[in-house]
Amino acid sequence: MVVAGVDGCRAGWFVVVRYLETERVKHYVAPDFREVLDGCDGASVIAVDIPIGLLDSVEEGGRPADRYARKLLGRPRSSSVFSPPCRPALTSETYEQAAAATRARSVKGRSLTRQSFHLFRKLREVDALMTPERQEVVREAHPELSFAAMNGGHALVERKIRAEGRRLRIELLRAAGFASLEELPSASAGKDVNVDDVLDAYVCCWTAMRIARGDAERIPENPTRDPRGLLMEMWF
């Protein structure tokens, strides 16, 4: 059985593949999400850190899964969960256009964060390829929820951008069976792939393993579908 974890990076997508029978792990960079799917062809589960399933209008706090994730993580890690844009805004080419499209679909006139807009390219890639059938393999995961699950249900206080936060996450990943990660962050980091991207892809791979084995959790327990029939859920 093969599973994969995926996280976006400046070069495209950082992909970690694990072969469960042999415990062999490999990683690579895919330039776009189509190549992620092609490279992971045959995988039983692909867990990716990107919103899957989008609303057509703006709801306070985002989708139910986003609100639930923030409650589980608590402060300060709740800030790592952003509200994805509504689908109509994804066609916007500039931040100003996207912000206007967001405000037009918000009862309270909410705008859009620039952090969210910077993810539009990757959101468009994934949204264009996702179908309810493909979602049986490709699942949305959130790295901080997964690290919290690794840590006995306790969210990690230290951020990944700090040395202590990275050390803690590497220790958790190694204890979970990713021994090859010992020197990987320093070896893989560069202008196109950050250490954060590497760690998040690895923990998404761990979540994919849990899904494949029937051990994973998801929020909400009974997720709703977006207007295209995609489940709005997170796995960890």
Image (spheres, grey):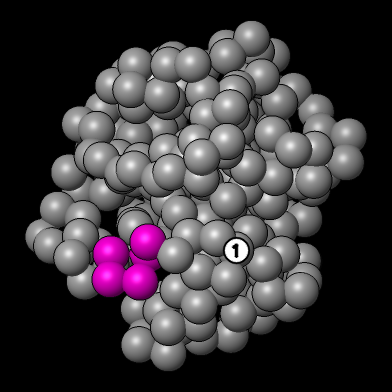
Q: Is residue 36 above or below residue 120?
A: above
Residue at the location (23% across, 39% down)?
29
Q: Nearer the viewer, residue 20 or 4?
A: 20
Q: Is residue 7 visible?
A: yes
In the figure, is residue 104 to the left or right of 15? right
The secondary structure that most of the magenta stretch takes on is helix
Residue 183 sits inside the magenta stretch? yes
The answer to which image quadrant residue 36 occupies is top left
Range of magenta residues: 180-184
- Image coordinates of residue 147 in percent, x first then y, are 60, 66
The answer to which image quadrant residue 17 occupies is top left
Residue at the location (25% across, 40% down)?
28
In the figure, is residue 115 to the left or right of 2? left
- Image coordinates of residue 87 in percent, x first then y, are 50, 26
Image quarter where the N terminus lies is: top right
Q: Is residue 125 above or below residue 41?
A: below
Which residue carries the number 1 mark? 176
